[in-house]
Image (cartoon, rainbow, N blue to C red):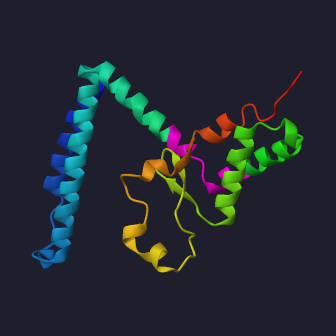
Amino acid sequence: MSLMRVGGRVTALRQKLGDKLVLPDRFKDTFVEKWLKYWNGLVRDYSEVAIGVVKETYTKPKKSVAYGTGILCLYKAAQHNPDDEAFMTVLRRQTNRMIMVAPELQNRVSADYLLMLERAINQKKLRFLSLGICTLVWVDLYAEDDCTYPAICEFTKVGYLNFHERVIDVGFCNEFWRLKWKMRDYDVNYL
């Protein structure tokens, strides 16, 4: 309950300082006064929100723990969001693992997936969309440096309604999950 009293003390201190701080007459009706009013209002609003949050955490502790856990999980997911460099590193590592296996012992699903990724990279159609907490890897219809009319026209681009059909991998927590899943059994062991 000591934080409840801190909120009252912060409010009292703000009122005392507001009474003591007086703007000189030369700054009256200028942008300095407007700027000062703006920042005073902003500080007042955010301090009220902070005090309200602290008071609500005391009245509803389970809700505050749930929100805190959710915010922490989102923060950690954003911190460990993989990028295109990480994807290329993992792809090279998986391709090198696949090369070490004889072609007749390779799993066709894994080999076809790696071949599709290599073709998309060679044709410059592979795109990455970072959403902050995860990264979507998708294949575009046209290369990034293609200057033909269908590639430039906005009506022939991948739309929002069929974008999910073009997504081939999802990166989350420093892993690209579909690539990891496809390469799970990349060699066919007959023994």
Question: What residue lies at 17% left-to-right and 48% top-to-bottom?
Answer: 16
* Residue 172 left/right relative to 85: left
The residue most toward the front is 104
Asked if residue 173 lies left or right of residue 183, the reply is: left
Q: Is residue 81 left or right of residue 67?
A: right
* Residue 75 lies in the magenta-colored region: no
Residue 101 found in image quarter: top right
Q: Is residue 166 visible?
A: yes
On whether residue 87 falls in the magenta region, the answer is yes
Give the percent coordinates (x, y) of residue 143: 57, 69
Q: Position of residue 73 (x, y in %)?
A: 47, 34
Residue drawn at x 36%, y 69% is 155
Measured along the vertical axis of the image, is residue 89 above or below residue 6? below
Q: Nearer the viewer, residue 109 or 179?
A: 109
Count of picture labels: 0
- Horizontal and vertical percent position of residue 22: 15, 63
Q: Could you say which quadrant of the image residue 53 lies in? A: top left
Residue 56 position in % (x across, y down): 24, 27
Residue sitting at x 86%, y 43%: 103
Quadrant of the frame with the N terminus: top left
Please identify the quadrant where the C terminus is shown: top right
Residue 176 visible (yes or no): no
Check the image and report above or below for 190 versus 154.
Answer: above
> Most prominent secondary structure in the magenta stretch?
helix
Please tell me whether residue 60 is drawn above or below residue 98 in the rendered image: above
Residue 68, relative to residue 88: is it above or below? above
What is the span of residues highlighted in magenta in the rendered image? 76-89
Q: Residue at x 70, y 39 (%)?
A: 109
